[in-house]
Image: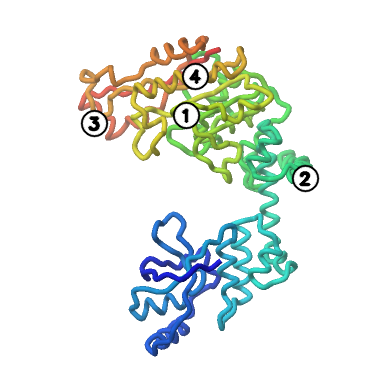
Amino acid sequence: MKNDFVTIPISDIYLDESIYPRENIDHKRINVFVENLRDNFKFDPIEVQAFPGQKGKYRILDGAHRWSAFKKAGQVEIKAHIMVLNQIDPLLYAAKMAIGPRQLTETETKNTARRAYKNNSRLTAVEIGKAIGRSRQTVDKYIADLRAARLLSLDLKIFHLNQLGIPQERIAKRLDIPQKTLSNHSAKMPELAFWLNGDLSKGFTVPQVAQKHGWPEPLVWSQALKGKDDLSRFSSLYWDLRPWDVWDFKADKRFGDENPEQIPAQVIAHILYFFSSQNDLVFDPMAGSGVCADTCLALNRRCWSFDMNDRPEIRPEIEPYYWDLEGGWEDMPILSAREKPELIIWEPPWFEKNAQGVPEKNISKLSKKDYLQFLETSLLFLKKQFKKNTKLAFINRDYRDYYDCPAYKEDPKKAIFFIDYCKILKQTGWNVTYTILVPLSSEPFEGERGEYMQGKGILSTTGRYVMMAV
């Protein structure tokens, strides 16, 4: 509904191309409006909407040419209705209001329909058609390829989550679809795998098949290695298996999003091999770049992953969850599941050394004292919630104040050491069974940085541990 018009500074109003239905501005029309203004012609107020995320700013819904003319004529203010659209798509509203002398062209109408559907795939052809003045059949033709691509993308997401053993009700909630829709798509899963496995059987490599079908490579590995035991999977992945307590590996770019500090997939694979069995449920409470979930796909483990950064399009398998620093984690989705995990793989973020650029109320912002207190509280919580024989792979490292401090000047009160983690694990009821070294790369300390550290007597650390506990 329109409210009474208000006067808004021209400088506070913007033409947002993402909701503008026309291909370009008609400058001849603007010049005509400028002449009208000089002749004291009175224009109807334009329509604007509060600009999302920009306080005190507005974007145009209707009246782009009038606004442009006012600006060109040197006016500083313009009358406008501030619209509240609620659930109405602003692009479609703007298209519906394009009823001036120059209607939307066929190209503009088609592009508007396609843009609206891309923005909100829940819009029906009827809803789009009403806004742009076209029949349902015409809109269906406009968006047929987009709808097919969306359905295929949804099929793939469902297949992905299903391969990781995520329950149907969780999949429906994560993808925001009704259970009936999920059931309809689930029926297509065998067909999806059939075409992919056909290419694998013809000798195409996993990367080739992933590229051809648009699948994540770890998901293709889950199919290529189907039915194989763990040793065969390691061999197929060109991973060597190290039956000793030093796992020194570099990151495998096939698994996890690119991140200079990500845990190597081979480390996760070794944890899975030695401390779980195929089809076991693994819990990854702080998933980060997704290495754990990807590796679970390759080694046929089910995996539930949570992280505070929600990336539903590229990482649908990682559910959003924020570890409130004050506790109160009873709402954690996995707690209400019928089945509890056999293995927890937890690599918490660094404490205050990694604070720059991190949002407030993040673990990485905590002081040493608060960081250790958070670990104690959360480890105790996990111990109480899961099975007595649930195993924990706790991955962390020593933290020292070495960045610009010579070794002989370091203050041990500012550091966190391996022994601190051991104390916390013991206090919270976890019994450490293995300590495995999984060193960080020394590359950051080479070159100019290395020479600087040598000259200043700075002693860095590449030490990192996997502490297995039960």
* Amino acid type of the residue that numbered disc 4 sits on in the rendered structure: Leu
* Amino acid type of the residue that numbered disc 3 sits on in the rendered structure: Tyr
Crowd tier of the residue under label 3, counting other residues whose Cα lies within 10 Å: few below 14, some 14–19, many 20 or above: some
Give the spatial CA distance, label 2 vs label 3.
61 Å
Instruction: Indicate left or right for 315 with 228 as reference.
Output: left
Q: In the rendered view of the protein, which quadrant contains the N terminus?
A: bottom right
Numbered disc 4: secondary structure = helix
Mark nearer the viewer, 1 or 2: 2
Mark nearer the viewer, 2 or 3: 2
Instruction: Indicate left or right for 418 with 264 as reference.
Output: left
Give the spatial CA distance, label 1 vs label 2.
42 Å
Numbered disc 3: secondary structure = helix
Q: Which residue is at 52% across, 36% downward?
A: 253
Give the spatial CA distance, label 4 vs label 1.
28 Å
Q: Quadrant of residue 470?
A: top right
Q: Position of residue 92 (x, y in %)?
A: 59, 66
